[in-house]
Image: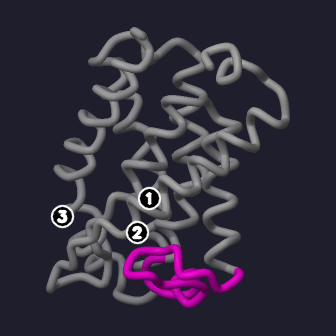
Amino acid sequence: MQTFIQSRSLSATLILSMSGTLAIVLCSQIRVDLPFTPVPITGQTFAVVLWGLLFGPRAGVGAVLMYLSAGALGMPVFAGFASLPALWGPTAGYLIGFIPAAWLAGVLRDSGWTQTFIWSTVSAFAASVPILILGTVVLSVFVGIENALMMGVIPFVVGDLVKSVIAAGIATAVKKK
C-alpha cells in the first residue's frame, strides 16, 4: 500500500483523487450554520487540507477539481447538499479557494515542511489562508468588504486552527506508520 501511495503513476493519483473527493463530500455535510453570515462552518476545509498533507499536491488538487466538477454538474455534494448554485453565491470563493489550499498543503508536504506535528500544523493553517482570502473577496461582492471580514474571516480563524491541529495530528500519525 505504501508503495502505491508513493507512486507517481496516473492510476494512483486518480484513485487517491477519487477517494479524496469522497472524503470532501462526506466532510462537507458536517455543517454548522451561523446566524450572522451566509458562510457555514463545515468539514470541507479539513478534508481539503488533510488530503494535500497526506497525498501531495496532485492528489489534493485532483480531489478538489473532481469535487467542484461534481457540484458544477448538479450533484448535491456541497455543504447542505447544494450543487451548482453554490458556485454562484456568497460561498463560491471559499469553494474555489480549495484549489490553492490543497496545492499549498501538498507542496509544503513535498518540501519537507510537515516532518513534525508543529510544522504540519503550521502548514495546514497556511493552506487554509487561500480559502479565507478568496472566500472573503467573493463574499465582499455580496456584503461589502467590511462586512466580509466580520462575516467570512473572523468567525473561522479559531475553527481553522482547530482543524489544522487535527489534520496535522492525523498526517503526522500516518507518516510514522
Q: Main secondary structure of the magenta part?
A: loop
Residue 132 is situated, as x and y percent measured from the top left of the image, at 39, 58
Stretch of the chain drawn in magenta: 73-91
The residue that mark 1 highlights is 133
User: In terms of secondary structure, where does tag 3 sit?
Assistant: helix
Q: Residues within 10 Å of mark 2 (few under 14, many from 20)?
A: many
Mark pair 3, 1: CA separation:
14 Å
Q: Is residue 16 left or right of residue 105?
A: right
Residue plotted at (40% across, 69% down): 136
Q: Is residue 176 left or right of residue 130?
A: left
Q: Residues within 10 Å of mark 3 (few under 14, many from 20)?
A: some
Residue type at mark 2 is Thr
User: In terms of secondary structure, where does tag 1 sit?
Assistant: helix
Q: What quarter of the picture does the C terminus occupy?
A: top left
Residue 19 is situated, as x and y percent measured from the top left of the image, at 59, 47
- Marker disc for residue 90: none
Residue type at mark 1 is Ile
The residue that mark 3 highlights is 155
